Image (cartoon, coloured by chain):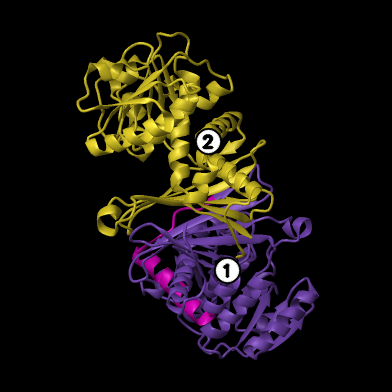
Chain colours: A purple, B yellow
Amino acid sequence: MVRILNKSNVAELLVMSDALEYVEDAYRQLSLGNAIVPQRITITDPAPGLTLIMPGIIGGEMNALATKIVSVYKNNPEKYNMPTVLGKIMIQDINTGEIVGIMDGGLITAMRTGAATGVSVKYLARKDSTSMSIFGAGTQARKQVVATYWALNQKLEKCKVYDVKRAASESFKAELEKELGIEIEIIDEVKDEFFQSDILVAASTSSEPLFSGEKIRDGMHISSIGAHAPKARELDSLTIKKANLRVAGMKEACVAEAGDYIIPINEGIISSDDIVSIGDIITGKTAGRQSANEITIFKSVGIAAQDVAVAKLVYDRAIKNGIGQDIDF
Amino acid sequence: MVRILNKSNVAELLVMSDALEYVEDAYRQLSLGNAIVPQRITITDPAPGLTLIMPGIIGGEMNALATKIVSVYKNNPEKYNMPTVLGKIMIQDINTGEIVGIMDGGLITAMRTGAATGVSVKYLARKDSTSMSIFGAGTQARKQVVATYWALNQKLEKCKVYDVKRAASESFKAELEKELGIEIEIIDEVKDEFFQSDILVAASTSSEPLFSGEKIRDGMHISSIGAHAPKARELDSLTIKKANLRVAGMKEACVAEAGDYIIPINEGIISSDDIVSIGDIITGKTAGRQSANEITIFKSVGIAAQDVAVAKLVYDRAIKNGIGQDIDF
């Protein structure tokens, strides 16, 4: 029997405060050596898009085994009126290997990516943070704000948003003001005041740095979740250089995939020893923010452990609450 | 919309003669460079079993993209009254990346593995072959016989079967005599006459050689589909040495995974240059059997291209015939 969970089932079962907890635990288990995330497989030619195959396993109390198959086809919207990113997650019973659940992967991907920033905010931002600025107003950007809101124990008051598409910012504002009850300010041109917020999030589709590191001010926490290729980045080398603490969702993954860290390493500005995994801060192996003046950076590329953890949460809750459809096959 | 195909749907849609054709085409496309089979991912600890994640893509006319997730948990039968091997195949639309079909993977795995031997029989066995002997009487062994029967254009007349479990051989005999109308002889002790058949198939769970290469006679075709780890093998070094033609389902996979070839290579008996992929024989890049006296060997470890091809066949036929269940998620 396989429990099938469609988009609305997942939406019904998944709230950000829980996703934050599960993603934090995924990072913790990675640090403890209880989670294994094999290098994901990328399939391209002869397909006109990209498919990523992302399996992972988390032991400990979570005991979760799942694989996400996610595709990124840039021409889908124009050519087929379909989303660029599509995916499903197959969850196995870790004791028998049987696939016991298959669920839509879209919302889970957005929520776990938001939760990554949320976990970084919890551990790296100043405790008295109340404001954020964000590059990007898409689906992913919205979950970044929701996660930051919950990570700050609902103390987020204001968010400035910049997107090249004004319409996206307007819908972002309408949606989040309603959902979170915070003030959203749409920014049409990025000036100095954009960098006065306590937290700065980059959730863009840009592969070039979004701003000069000169703009960064002391005490800020920066999270970058866009750009995940060795030659692409959202943050420039000066930003990386100025930071007091350079953190990764998973160091090995960022050093292999994220230009934000790879390029400054190649330039000799930092070495890979200057980057720590957030799991090691969560478990106390490495110190976190030391003072209110420090600049902290969090860079994450998606790793399967995030998906596995959130998929397990959704699946367990679906079984408990009788949500979804059972198919015998 | 995702088409869900359970075990009986797959059984209804898949016959061996078609599986043979599709697996042959998968090997052909591999040889032509139109198919890509990334190294599969293996997940074990902290799970008590093994999960293999096997994605693959085949271009050309087939245009198929799919991933098999298959688990091997040896304690399942005793502990949970469940099969050792479980799996599902997710098939994507190669043009959009969307997962459009999910099907049970058990029968497809057995059929495509049988079909591999069938393709080898078609290209490597003597054309006048009418008899076979087989080590193993399990599910997989049965499909080996069915595939050989079809590969010989239904001219297979007799099959000798040996299995350590007599009951398995009896059920093998009953099933195949009914399905194929050929004579099945159960062998309780393997003696010289077992090696008088035209074709010898090894489909055992043994990790040690099943017989001495001294037994092998001229003109025989041997296919080994059990044992798929570097230190495990069904064929001894003398068998490999005596062969005139040493073929692999996919050379790169066998040289990485199959002790049947790896051990004699390490012993200096053959070099990897002495092994050819069957696709290269199908496409005529390499010569096949040269005379009725030659001994030919085929060794295959499962590769995703086989699953992708057969899954595409099943999916296309399901859509055409309205078989299975559509789920919106």
Q: Is circle 2 on the same chain as circle 1? A: no
Q: Which of A193 and A116 is in front in this view?
A: A116
- The residue at the point 35 percent across, 63 percent down is A33
Q: Which chain carries label 2?
A: B
* Residue corresponding to mark 1: A6
Q: Residue A309 carries which label?
A: none
Q: Which chain carries label 1?
A: A
Residue A37 among those drawn in magenta: yes
Residue B192 position, x and y percent, is 23, 16
Circles 2 and 1, Cβ within 8 Å, touching? The answer is: no
Residue B210 vertical placement versus A234 (above, below): above
Q: Mark 2 points at which residue?
A: B19
- Kindly report the distance in space between the C-alpha atoms of the residues bearing marks 2 and 1: 32 Å
Does any portion of residue A161 appear in the rendered image? Answer: yes
- Name the residue located 60 percent from the left edge and 74 percent from the top edge: A8
User: Which span is picked out in magenta?
Assistant: A14-41
The amino acid marked with disc number 2 is Ala
Question: In the picture provided, is B87 more to the left or to the right than A12?
Answer: left
**B84 is higher (above) or lower (below) than A251:** above
Residue at the spot 58% in from the left edge and 53% down from the top edge: B101
Please tell me whether the stretch drawn in magenta is mainly helix, strand or loop: helix
Badge 1: how crowded within 10 Å, few (<14), some, or many (20+)?
Answer: some
Spot occupied by residue A151 in the image (x, y as percentages of width and height): 52, 83
